[in-house]
Amino acid sequence: MQSQMMQIQENLANETVEASVGGGMVVATFTGQGDMKAIKIDPAAVDGEDMEMLEDLVISAVNEGLKKSRELMSEKMGGITGALSAMGMGL
């Protein structure tokens, strides 16, 4: 079971999820392990007069990307954590 968990962790490191906010103005990419790989900001979103909006978009994209990453991890690890719980070894 430990080797199965290690394999899932390796796979999660190679899978990515994206979160897009503001109609694609900010896109954050994360691995299945929750590491941010990239953030792309549309130049149209960079307005010196309204930096607060851009900051809010970045925060939203990062939070949504982390959420999607956690969901992917939970989905992939679900079988293993369920088996451990059944054996009385809940995580």
Image (spheres, rainbow, N blue to C red):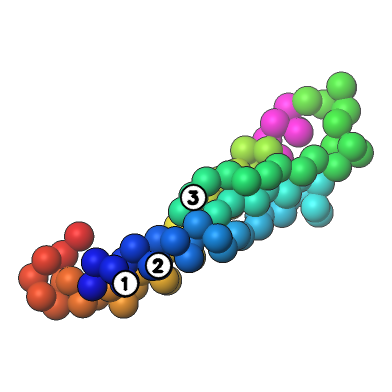
Q: Position of residue 71 (x, y in %)?
A: 46, 63
Closer mark to the observer between disc 3 and disc 2? 2
Q: Mark 1 points at which residue?
A: 4
Q: Position of residue 54 (x, y in %)?
A: 76, 33
The span picked out in magenta is 52-57
Q: Name the residue under label 2.
A: 8
**Viewer-closest of 73 and 42:** 73
Q: What residue type is labelled 2?
A: Ile
User: How many angstroms separate mark 3 from mark 2 (CA)?
Assistant: 14 Å
* Residue depicted at 50% across the width and 57% down the height: 13
- In the image, is 12 to the left or to the right of 21? left
**Viewer-closest of 11 and 48:** 11
Q: Where is residue 50 in the image (x, y as percent from the top left)?
A: 82, 26
**Viewer-closest of 54 and 29:** 29
Q: Which amino acid does label 1 sit on?
A: Gln
Q: How crowded is mark 2: few (under 14 residues within 10 Å), some or many (20 or more)?
A: some
Q: Mark 3 points at which residue?
A: 34
Q: Are marks 3 and 1 in contact (CB under 8 Å)?
A: no
- In the displayed orientation, state which residue is furthest to the front: 3
Q: Determine if the magenta segment contains residue 46.
A: no
Q: Are marks 2 and 1 in contact (CB under 8 Å)?
A: yes
